[in-house]
Amino acid sequence: MMAGWIAGAITVNAQITIFRQDDLQNRDSCDKMKYVVNYDMDFVENTEQVPYEYTHDRMLLQIGEKATAFFSYDTYLADSTNLEVMKRNGTDFVGGGGVSWRLYKNYPQEKHYTYMDKLGSERYACTEKVEEPVWQLVTDSATTIKEHPCLLATADYRGRKWYAWYAEDIPVSEGPWKLCGLPGLVLRAYDAENQYRFELSGIRNARPNENIVYVGKKYEDIDKKSLNKQYERYYGDPLGFISGNPNVKVTVTDQHGNKLNKMSAIPYNPIER
């Protein structure tokens, strides 16, 4: 039986992710970690609201010998806290608060991405072949980010035009999300519409015995087209989507604590179109 609940009030514009204890079980150490990179991510959820209002999240890129993982740092902190709660047989679990999706590269299948997300109590994993952006290097471009000299490259990729500043003095061909394949680590990236922005906030060598952990063994395999349909259902009627699970009871309140019978649609602006 699924163990899940929501702590605290759910407001009309909040994404709902229901905690499940098996989110913290059946975890694989999939690769030895080499580097840990932190990014600030700002993104626009409601593109119809002008000027844009940005949602902020702290993102974590874990780079291993072969695999990488990219997900919210707040999710990482929540997982660490909840693992300790489980060890004590407690029930005071915390929510992540950040974006709910994760992206793995080269695990569990080499040369493939595994994109995973949580919608309410549902868990989905979509696997696709790695297709790196086809970058065009911009001549006579130069800037300095966090004391690293950087060069600019551009690419039309997954429905957006991307600009990426990369540092050749960090010879790691990785970056935030799927923005990889350059001769250096991507330190700053943004799309032409300025709806998604990534900025390096820190980088360090991994500690001894620090591993990338894969959490998707209990996720339902799904193809991209079917996943997009689930997103349409969820963001169009989040309460209806969640209420379809008989094991979950949801109470929605406004900012004043008043109970609501409906929850409005959630603006949806995916990074990949």
Image: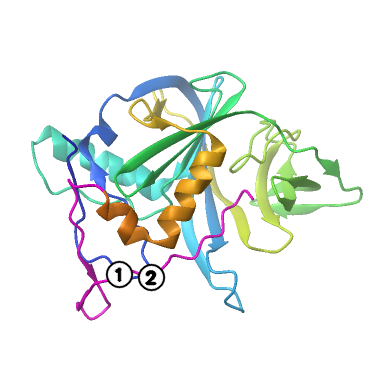
Q: Residues within 10 Å of mark 2 (few under 14, many from 20)?
A: some
Residue 21 falls left or right of residue 155: left
Disc 1, disc 2: CB below 8 Å? Answer: no
Over which residues does the magenta segment extend?
A: 245-273
Q: Quadrant of residue 190?
A: bottom right
The residue under the point 9% across, 42% down is 90
For the residues carrying marks 1 and 2, which lies nearer the camera in this image? Answer: 2
The residue under the point 24% across, 72% down is 261
Residue 83 falls left or right of residue 185: left
Q: Quadrant of residue 97?
A: bottom left
Q: Which labelled disc corresponds to residue 264?
A: 2
Foreground of the two, 110 or 250: 250
Above or below, 77 against 65 in this view is: below
The residue under the point 27% across, 78% down is 255
Q: Secondary structure at mark 1?
A: loop
Quick one: label 1 or label 2, which is nearer the N terminus?
1
The x and y percentages for residue 87 are: 13, 33
The x and y percentages for residue 28 are: 36, 21
Amino acid type at mark 1: Thr
Residue 58 in sight here: no
Foreground of the two, 129 or 102: 129
Residue 63 part of the magenta-drawn span: no
The x and y percentages for residue 107 are: 50, 23
Q: Secondary structure at mark 2?
A: loop
Above or below, 199 against 68 in this view is: below
